[in-house]
Amino acid sequence: MLTSKGLYDRLLATYGPSEGWPGNRVTMMATAVMVQNTAWTAVVRAMERFPQELTAQYLLALPIEELMDYIRPCGFMRRKAETIQTVMAWYGRYDFDAAQVEAVPQERLRQELLALKGIGEETADVILLYAFHKPVFVLDAYTRRLLSRLGGTAQTDAERRVWFTAGVPEADKVYADYHWLLLEHGKRYCKKRPLCEECPLREACAQKIQEEKSS
C-alpha cells in the first residue's frame, strides 16, 4: 500500500498544486458554511449574487432574510445564514483581527468553532486551515473513501488523520494542497461509482487489485 507521502507525491505530480480556497478570510469562512451538503458550483452562484465583497460587518448587518436570498443556490438557506452570522460574531470576539485569532492555540480555536451551532469538524478544520493558516488536516467523505479503497484499516477519524499526516510536512500549505488534491481525485475518479480503469492510482488500489483477482 502507498504511504501517505507516496500518495501525496503521486497526486501532486498528477494534478499540480492547488490555487487555494478563493476569497478573503471572511469569504473563506462564509463559503465553508455555504458548501455544506452541496456542490461548489452552487457556492459560486451564490457568491455572484452578493452586491459587494464580503466583510464580517456587512454579513452581520444583513437582515437574515436578505442573506438567505443571496445564498439560496446553496440550499438550507436559513440554517446556513444563521451559521454564517454566528461565525462572524465569533470572529468579532477577536475584533475581526486575524492576527489575534492566529495567536490562539489551534485546539482552543477548534473547540470554540465546534461549540458554534451549525459548525461540524470538517467546516471548523477548513476555517482553521484556509482562513487562519493553522496546520490542521481536513477529513471529508472523499478522503475517507479513498483511504478505504487503497486498503487502509483506520476505523476512526483520529486514526485516519494519523495516517494521512505521517511523513508529510506539518504545514498549512502542504495540508491545503493535500486536501485539494484528494478532493480533485475524488471528483474525477474515486467517485461513489469509481472510474478505476482511468484512475492514476489503479495499480496501488487494494479494491481494484482484489476485483482483478476475483475476475
Image (cartoon, rainbow, N blue to C red):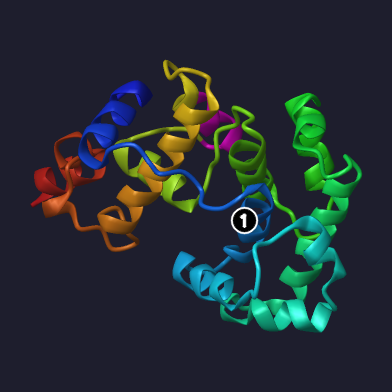
Which residue is rendered at x = 57% and y = 67% of the image? 37
Could you tell me what secondary structure mostly forms the magenta stretch?
helix
> In the figure, is residue 119 to the left or right of 117?
left
Asked whether residue 157 is drawn in magenta, I would say: yes
Nearest the eye: 129 or 187: 129
Residue drawn at (83%, 53%) of the image: 116
- Secondary structure at badge 1 equals helix
From the image, tell me which residue sits under label 1.
32
Viewport quadrant of the N terminus:
top left
In the image, farthest residue toward the front = 52
Instruction: Tell me the magenta residue range.
Output: 155-162
Percent from the top left, x then y, of residue 36?
Answer: 60, 63
Residue sticking out furthest to the right: 93
Residue 61 higher or lower than 200, as above or below: below
65 displayed left or right of 175: right
Q: Position of residue 108 (x, y in %)?
A: 82, 30
Q: For the point 81% across and 55% down, which residue is it? A: 88
Pinpoint residue 143: horizontal percent, then vertical percent: 44, 44
Which residue is rendered at x = 45% and y = 41% of the image? 179
Viewed as shown, does residue 96 lie left or right of 202? Answer: right
